[in-house]
Image: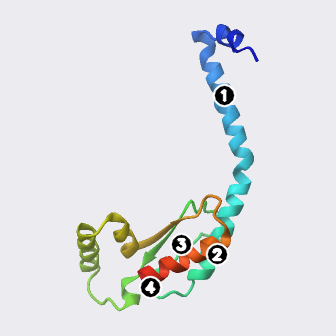
Amino acid sequence: MDLSKIEAAITPRTKALVVVRMTAAFGRAQLAKLHGYLRTESESTAILLGEWKGVRGLILPIEPEGHAHTYFNFTCRVDPSALGWNGSSRRFLDAVLLARQRSPPDRLLARASIRTRIRGTRGQELLRRGTEAKLKEIL
């Protein structure tokens, strides 16, 4: 393809149109992959919910009826009372913040919540093994 003719045809007036068409082409290409991405994330979410259901102290994410979650990140919260904490929630937060000052950020994330990125080409068995290892490390 001779790009010189295309470049010669681009003027300040038509430049915006070319950019819009290119952006639309990229968007269409990505939209064609969307259903596959969402299916993979849904399958990965089902694995995580199944593996982590019933783990004491974890508050799993919920999907309200009539809504669909993308689960780009799968974030669980920690329930301190379920782990035997009977102090104030403020003291628990202070303890987490203190741990943040003493530990690298990744350790804080591991102590305060569990967040796993599920998008991508990770196989389901690899996802299972990774989540089991993460739970053993945290709990």
| Image disc number at residue 47 | 2
**Residue 78 x %, y %:** 41, 78
Residue type for callout 3: Pro
Tag 3's secondary structure?
A: loop
**Residue 26 x %, y %:** 67, 36
**Quadrant in which the N terminus is drawn:** top right
Whether residue 59 is visible: no
Indicate which disc, 1 or 4, sits on the residue closer to the N terminus.
Answer: 1
Tag 1's secondary structure?
A: helix
**Residue 34 x %, y %:** 70, 51
Tag 4's secondary structure?
A: loop
Q: Badges 3 and 4: C-beta atoms under 8 Å apart?
A: no
| Viewer-closest of 126 and 52 | 126
Residue type for callout 2: Ile
Q: CA distance from mark 2 to mark 1?
A: 38 Å
Quadrant of the rendered image containing residue 29: top right
Q: Residues within 10 Å of mark 1 (few under 14, many from 20)?
A: few
**Quadrant in which the C terminus is drawn:** bottom left
Tell me the residue at 71%/9% (across/down).
5
